[in-house]
Image: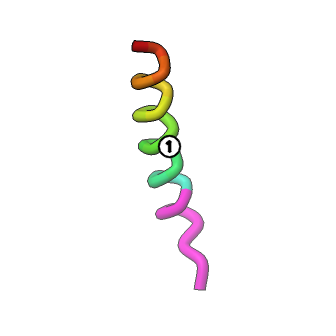
Amino acid sequence: EFKHDNIIMNTSQFTQSSWARHVQ
């Protein structure tokens, strides 16, 4: 079973972290 909400939240956090590291 797929947990879309969980994936979206996880991806959101991962993307934000990645972006923050890239920007800095």
For the C terminus, the quadrant is top left
| Circle 1 Cα neighbour tier, 10 Å, few/some/many (<14 / 14–19 / ≥20) | few
Residue stretch in magenta: 1-7
Colour scheme of the rendered structure: rainbow
Residue at left 46%, top 54%?
A: 10
In the image, is 2 to the left or to the right of 9?
A: right
Vertical placement of residue 21 versus 15, above or below: above
Quarter of the image where one finds residue 1: bottom right
Provide residue 3's location: percent of width, then percent of height.
Answer: 54, 73
x 51%, y 38%: residue: 15
Q: Is residue 3 magenta?
A: yes
Residue 14 in the magenta stretch? The answer is no
What kind of element bears circle 1?
Answer: helix
Residue 18: x %, y % from top left: 47, 33
| Residue 20 in the image, given as x and y percentages of width and height | 42, 23
Q: Residue 11 appears at what percent x and percent y? A: 52, 49
Q: Which residue is mark 1?
A: 12
Amino acid carrying label 1: it is Ser
Residue situated in front as seen by the camera: 15 or 5: 15
Q: Is residue 4 above or below residue 8?
A: below
